[in-house]
Image (cartoon, rainbow, N blue to C red):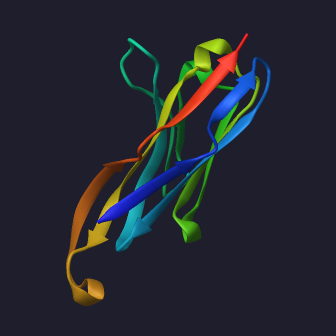
Amino acid sequence: QVQLVESGGGLVQAGGSLRLSCAASGRIFNINDMGWYRQAPGKQRELVADITSGGHINYADSVKGRFSISRDGAKNTVYLQMDSLKPEDTAVYYCKAKGTRCASTWCSATIPFDYWGQGTQVTVSS
């Protein structure tokens, strides 16, 4: 199995910054995509930003210029630097990772995975 552990959420005033981290662990063969999604109360989960293993990045229009996603391939970790936070950024932020994991000893066989983290609360006060 693969586990995703998020950290870095919290309460911040409008205009402030937070940095989220998500570390993937387990019998990982490779990770193709890692990303951050968020879900506010009463709303659907939406993409915030994602990054491929080749470094291609997508941002939601609402966070462009304020948020920055990065990843450390050696640590299987993705980060989300959030600056100029607004009250409308308040949500539970979820990490997501897609790739392949070892399915046998010596990793002679692999299977794809697509997992979510448990979520971390980000609250921005006005």
Q: Position of residue 29 (x, y in %)?
A: 36, 73
State the residue at coordinates (65%, 13%).
87
Which of the pair 124/62 is nearer the observer? Answer: 124
Residue extending farthest to the bottom is 106
* Residue 82 position (above or below residue 30): above
State the residue at coordinates (73%, 10%).
126
Q: Is residue 108 left or right of residue 75?
A: left
Q: Is residue 86 left or right of residue 36?
A: right
Q: Position of residue 51 (x, y in %)?
A: 51, 47
State the residue at coordinates (60%, 29%).
122
Q: How many marks?
A: 0
* Residue 16 position (above or below residue 19): above
Q: Position of residue 2 (x, y in %)?
A: 34, 63
Q: Position of residue 101 (x, y in %)?
A: 30, 69
Q: Is residue 76 left or right of residue 99?
A: right
Residue extending farthest to the right is 15
